[in-house]
Amino acid sequence: MFTPQKLSYALNALEPFISARTMDFHYNKHYMGYIAKLNELTTGTVWQNMPLEQIIRDSRHLDTPLIYNNAAQVWNHEFFFSHIAPNRPRISLKLLNEHFGSLADFKRRFKEQALARFGSGYCWLTDQDGLWQITSAANADNPIALDLGKPLLGIDVWEHAYYLDYQNSRADFVDAYLNNLVFPQEAG
Ligand SMILES: [Fe+2]
């Protein structure tokens, strides 16, 4: 059985940038739904005791994508919720500057890729043996499935992540994510 990862902060801890109502739906309905579905699909099968990352790699090319999609979405949400936490690990600004020129240039490029994703998906920042890259990924695709190395950032741009707070303005959500959640100390 896959057990849900507890949220390390209160549902209202990210207000006003992400509302308690959005967090409630996102964590308690969407994320818990992926956990429940993954358990339903894997209990009593060869998948049930497999590490999540292995399931993601091994199930990606199956004819039926249900196991892959639910396993990847469990992983994606655990990553997303933990790296927007108030006590999250910090990204090295020195390394970010080395790879992208400046924080402003990084934000501009990351936002472009997050907005370029048509429909549901994620925008990832990854470190593959020292190569930092920004990747726009469809639906549940993530750095494990795409073999992109270590994930550093990943914004959920499915509409359920922002619609209650920003309606159709994904750009405003991406700005809040970059300027207020991930790099608040650099906002000026
Ligand atoms: Fe989500």
Image: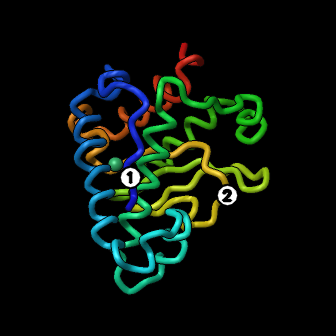
What's the colour scheme?
rainbow
Q: Residue at x 43, y 31 (%)?
A: 8
**Residue at numbered disc 1:** 3
Farthest-out residue, top: 188
Check disc 1: other Cα within 10 Å, few if <14, some if 14-19, many if 20+.
few
Left or right: where 83 falls relative to 170:
right
Check disc 2: other Cα within 10 Å, few if <14, some if 14-19, many if 20+.
some
Label 2 or label 1, whichever lies nearer to me, is 1
Tell me the quadrant of the picture where the N terminus can be found: bottom left
SS at mark 2 in the image? loop
Residue 37 lies, in percent from the top left, at 28, 64
Left or right: where 7 falls relative to 49:
left
In depth, the one of 114 and 17 nearer the eye is 17
Q: Residue at x 42, y 36 (%)?
A: 174
Left or right: where 103 falls relative to 42:
right
SS at mark 1 in the image? loop
Residue 159 numbered tag:
none
Farthest-out residue, bottom: 63
Residue 19 lies, in percent from the top left, at 27, 27
Disc 1 Cβ-to-ligand 1 distance below 8 Å: no
**Residue at numbered disc 2:** 149
Is residue 138 at all visible to an observer of this figure?
Answer: no
Is residue 37 at all visible to an observer of this figure?
Answer: yes
Identity, as a three-letter code, of the amino acid under mark 2: Gly
Q: Give the spatial CA distance, label 2 vs label 1.
A: 25 Å
Identity, as a three-letter code, of the amino acid under mark 1: Thr
In depth, the one of 53 and 158 nearer the eye is 53
In the image, residue 91 above or below residue 121: above
Residue 139 lies, in percent from the top left, at 38, 62
Left or right: where 12 falls relative to 73:
left
Q: Residue at x 46, y 55 (%)?
A: 75
Answer with the quarter of the image where residue 108 lies.
top right
